[in-house]
Image: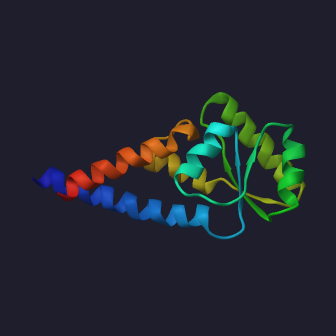
Amino acid sequence: MRLRSREGSVLRSKDKAFRRLLSELSEGDAAIVVEGKRDRDALRRMGITNQIFLINQKPDIVAERVAKTAHTAIVLTDFDRKGEELCLRITSALEGCSVKPDLDVRRKLKYLFGVRFFEELDRKVEEFQEKLEEIER
C-alpha cells in the first residue's frame, strides 16, 4: 500500500510537469523542429497545433524557414547518435538565424517518459496516463 501511494505521488508529480510542458508545446509562437513525419504525426495526435518543421533539408535551410515565422524553436530530435548530431547542427543553425533554440522540453520529455524516439511519444504518454488512472483507482 505504501509503495502504491509513493508511486502515485511520483506519477501525479510527473503528470503535473507534463501538463506544463504540453501547454509550452501548444501555446505561444514557438515553432517545433523534428526529424521526420512520424515525429510530427505523434505530436499532432497529442493535439499539438504549433507550426512543426521537419529537418528534411540542410539545417541552415530549415533554420531560415523557421526564422521567417518564429523567434523561438523547440528542438525535438531523437536521442540516438543521429538525433544528437542533428540537435547540435540545427541548434547552431537556429542561433545563426537569430532564433532561440529551446532544448529544455526535449530533456524533460526524455526524463518524464523515457522517450528515445519522438515518434513514440504519443504511445508513451498514453501508457503513462493508463498507469496513472490505474494508481488512482
| Front one among 108 and 117 | 117
Placement of 131 over or under 58, stated as above or below: below
Coloured how? rainbow
The answer to whether 126 appears left or right of 6 in the picture is right
Query: Which residue is pictured at 44% across the width and 50% down the height?
Result: 112
Query: Residue 83: x and y, percent?
Result: 67, 35
Q: For the image shown, how many numbered marks are present on the structure?
A: 0
Query: What percent of the width, then of the height, locates residue 129?
Result: 35, 52
Q: Extreme bottom residue here? A: 28
Residue 84 drawn at (x, y percent): 67, 36
Which image quarter is the C terminus in? bottom left
Left or right of residue 129, residue 136 in this image: left
Q: Residue furthest top?
A: 81
Quarter of the view holding residue 50: bottom right
Q: Nearer the viewer, residue 104 or 51?
A: 51
The answer to which image quadrant residue 6 occupies is bottom left
On the question of residue 55 being in view, the answer is yes
Q: Residue at x 43, y 48 (%)?
A: 125
Q: Residue furthest left?
A: 1
Instruction: Look at the image and tell me whether residue 7 can be seen.
Output: no
Q: Position of residue 37 (x, y in %)?
A: 67, 39
Q: Residue at x 87, y 53 (%)?
A: 65
